[in-house]
Amino acid sequence: MPIVHTSVEGEQTIEDILDTIGDQHARDVLAAISREPRSAKELADECDLSLPTIYRRLEVLESNDLVVERTAVSGDGNHYNIYECNFDSTVIQLEDDEYKVRIYRRENLPDRFTQLWDDLGKD
C-alpha cells in the first residue's frame, strides 16, 4: 500500500495534535494499537489504566483522526468495538518560525485510484 501524507486540515489544529500526542496515556494507547487493533478492555489491561481513562484518550484520539473504531465479532457471535491506529507516522517540523505537522497514512488501492482520478479532473 502506498504511503501518502496530509497536512493537518479542517478542525484539527497543530496545537490539538501536539497536545494529544504530548499526553503519555494517549501515546501508550497509540503504541498498543499500532501493533494490532485492541478493545478498550484490552487497552486498559495492557496500559494499566482505568476504562474511563482509556475511553477519554480514545475520544480525543478519534477527534483528531488518529484512531478509528471498528466493530468486531467474537467467536460466540457477540459484537464489540476495537480501535486501531489511523496513521503510520507523524512528522513535526519547524520551518520559518512555523510548526508544520504531517500525518502519514496508508491508503488502500481503490481510495488511491479515486484520489488520482479526482486530481486528474482538476487540471
Image (tube, helix red, strand yellow):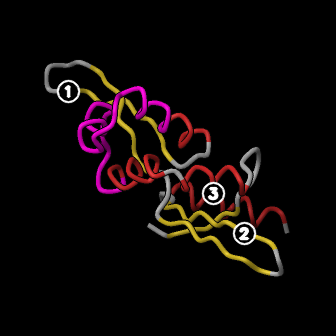
Label 2 Cα crowd, 10 Å radius (few <14 / some 14-19 / many 20+): few
Taking the image as shown, residue 104 lies to the left or right of residue 95, namely left
Which picture quadrant has residue 116? bottom right
The magenta span reads: 34-58
Q: CA distance from mark 2 to mark 1?
A: 41 Å
| Residue placed most toward the observer, 122 or 63 | 63
Looking at the rendered image, the disc whose residue lies closer to the viewer, 2 or 3, is 3
x, y (%) of residue 100?
A: 72, 69
Q: Is residue 92 above or below residue 43?
A: below
Residue 18 image label: 3
Outermost residue, left side: 75
Q: Secondary structure at mark 3?
A: helix
Residue 100 image label: 2
Q: Is residue 74 above or below residue 84?
A: above
- The residue under label 1 is 74
Residue 98 image label: none
| Residue placed most toward the observer, 108 or 38 | 38
- Residue lying at 53% horizontally and 34% vertically, measured from the top left: 59
Taking the image as shown, residue 50 lies to the left or right of residue 97, namely left
Q: CA distance from mark 1 to mark 3?
A: 35 Å
User: Which quarter of the rendered picture does the N terminus lie within?
Assistant: bottom left
Q: Amino acid at mark 3?
A: Leu
